[in-house]
Image (spheres, rainbow, N blue to C red):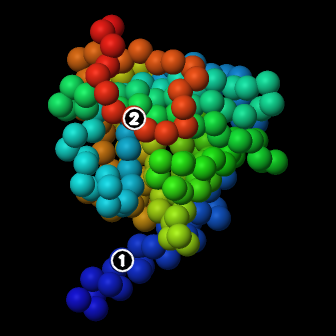
Amino acid sequence: MATAWLSVLGTLLCSLLVTSDVVPQDNFNLQAVAGKWYLIGFATNAQWFVDHRANMRMGTAMLTPTAAGDLQMSYASLRSDASCWRMGHLAKKTDVPGKFTFKSERMDNDNDMRVVDVKYDEYALIYNLKTKGGVSSVLNKLYGRETQLSPQLLEKFRQFSLENGILPENIAVLPQNDRHPPLTLALPRFFFLGECPDV
């Protein structure tokens, strides 16, 4: 038991130490990140992911810069039971280009999000530190402009996640959906489940 607790504590301390070293990409271009992306990679030690990973599928994201320099983020995905999962957040800009913050009302957590590596016509690697009740966890996401990325990029995502204290079994490349639900640009800032419209 003591060994297990030491392992968990070590992973937590490692992730917190790495956080201070995670910086956004130089010369981040907010306008260039706009548009449709596919959520391909997902990595976190959070228990909700461990519990629901089997139901998760590749989804779509629409990133829309605002006139104020913030980033509207809208997500949609079909679950394995054919129900529709949607989420939306308005990520507020900070003094550091490529770093944003937002509050998740549904999950009741604060988010520190950083675009750490991006090639605007191919992929984006996003780091997110979620904090609730003084407890923090890391969530890394890998996006692609297409539904497939090279093995080299998938390995880069895996290595980055391991460096952030995420366990190997909690680093996932999400299976593709046969179809993707349409996105809207002004989703509310909370989750909902329901039937996806036909596409």
Q: Which residue is mark 1?
A: 8
Along the line of sight, the residue nearer the viewer: 19 or 121? 19
Tell me which amino acid carries mark 1: Val
Q: Quadrant of residue 93?
A: top right
Q: Nearer the viewer, mark 2 or mark 1?
A: 2
Q: Is residue 115 visible?
A: yes
The percent position of residue 128, horizontal first and vertical second, equals 54, 51
Instruction: Answer few, some or many: residues within 10 Å of disc 2's Cα (few below 14, many 20 plus, some between 14 and 19).
Output: few
Q: Quadrant of residue 84?
A: top left
Tell me the quadrant of the picture where the N terminus can be found: bottom left
**Could you say whether the residue bearing mark 1 is in a helix, strand or loop?**
helix
Q: Is residue 120 visible?
A: no
Tell me the quadrant of the picture where the C terminus can be found: top left
Q: Residue furthest bottom?
A: 2
- Mark seen at residue 192: 2
For residue 36, above or below residue 158: above
The structure residue drawn at horizontal position 65% and vertical position 40%, both measured from the top left corner, is: 91
**Could you say whether the residue bearing mark 2 is in a helix, strand or loop?**
strand
Tell me which amino acid carries mark 2: Phe
The percent position of residue 150, horizontal first and vertical second, equals 37, 29
What whole-number distance in Å separates the C-alpha atoms at marks 2 and 1? 32 Å
The structure residue drawn at horizontal position 36% and vertical position 18%, both measured from the top left corner, is: 181
The structure residue drawn at horizontal position 31% and vertical position 19%, both measured from the top left corner, is: 196
Give the side of residue 126 with respect to residue 55, left or right. right
Chain-order first, disc 2 or disc 1: 1
The structure residue drawn at horizontal position 59% and vertical position 63%, both measured from the top left corner, is: 19
For residue 199, above or below residue 91: above
For residue 99, above or below residue 80: below
The percent position of residue 74, horizontal first and vertical second, equals 52, 28
Instruction: Answer few, some or many: residues within 10 Å of disc 1's Cα (few below 14, many 20 plus, some between 14 and 19).
Output: few
The percent position of residue 24, horizontal first and vertical second, equals 67, 46
